[in-house]
Amino acid sequence: MSRPEDTLPPDLFYNDAESRKYTTSSRIRSIQASMTNRALELLDLKGPSFILDLGCGSGLSGEILTNTEEIDGGPHTWIGMDISSSMLAEALQRDVEGDMLLADIGQGVPFRPGAFDAAISISAIQWLCNAESTSDEDAPDRRLKRFFDTLYASLKRGGRAVCQFYPKNDAQRSMISSAAIKAGFGAGILEDDPGTKNVKLYLVLTIGGGDVTGTVDGLRDVDVFDARRKDKSRKGMVPADRLKGSKAWILRKKAQAEGKGKVVKNSSRYTGRKRKVAF
């Protein structure tokens, strides 16, 4: 089945019929609610906050922000951005409480610096990996740069953003996370249900220092895999077949010699064995 991002730009894909179908589907509403609540959990807001909803659609996530209980840190005030006028029309018809702006997040977040306590985005930022035209300014890397640079500026010091997204492949996943890091964010990716067709990815972004892995400490069903530590532990390590004198190195050299038609001695269990020095 083709991905929506591969068929049409979002403002054309989400026409009146598609927007109504999306908003009224009980299955989609349930999934959207689950992902929004997960994003709120990752934001870990301690009290009512001013939140930017990026790709707000018909306000399904916004309703959850408005109705967050006081015991869970709510209720929150929010502003939404979306490129689809049909989606925003659905939101107006449903009389959601947030303010909304018709805008393309790929052109940047048009708010004053430090305006928001936090930001969320549900199933939207993967659209930025598709060029809207042949212009260099609409290339995915330019759109991602504008988005993350201006999002960073719009958040208060110590603010967080959580973006749930569906990358097409590892290249898109890397492109998105790299753009966030270049903008100055502390960034990490949380995977729910990894290795299944229901996998959900959350890009967790922080401003103002601190280790992003601390954001997920204590969350349910979460194991932290820090790729940075893995990379550090590998630095300076030499592959076994590159370590001169090792058995793997000897076998590799013999194989190379055989490939050149040379006669070499047969290998045995003693090949490459360390011998004690005899006096």
Image (cartoon, rainbow, N blue to C red):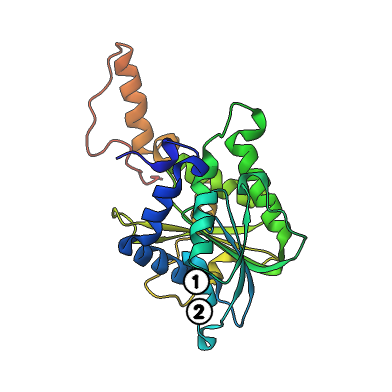
Residue 39 in sight from this viewpoint: yes
- Where 108 sits versus 142, above or below? below
Viewer-proximal residue among 14 and 208: 14
Q: Which residue sits furthest bottom? A: 71
Query: What residue would you read off at disc 2?
Result: 67
Mark 2 touching mark 1, by CB under 8 A?
Answer: yes
Residue shown at 51%/80% (left/top)? 68
Residue shown at 55%/47% (left/top)? 176
Horizontal side of residue 111 vs 37, given as left or right: right
Rendering coords of residue 114 (x, y %)? 75, 65
How many C-alpha atoms fall within 10 Å of the one at disc 1: few (<14), some, or many (≥20)? some
Q: Image quarter for residue 138? A: top right
- Where 51 sits versus 167, above or below? below
As drawn, the label of residue 63 is: 1
Horizontal side of residue 50 vs 8, given as left or right: right
Residue shown at 62%/49% (left/top)? 105
Rendering coords of residue 94 (x, y %)? 48, 66
As drawn, the label of residue 183 is: none
Q: Amino acid at mark 1?
A: Glu
Rendering coords of residue 82 (x, y %)? 57, 53
Q: Which residue sits furthest top? A: 261
Viewer-proximal residue among 75 and 86: 86
Q: Image quarter for residue 139? A: top right
The C terminus appears in which quarter of the rendering?
top left
- Dot 2 falls on a residue whose secondary structure is loop
Rendering coords of residue 149 (x, y %)? 70, 50
In space, the residues marked 2 and 1 are separated at their CA atoms by 6 Å
Residue shown at 40%/49% (left/top)? 18
- Dot 1 falls on a residue whose secondary structure is helix
How many C-alpha atoms fall within 10 Å of the one at disc 2: few (<14), some, or many (≥20)? few
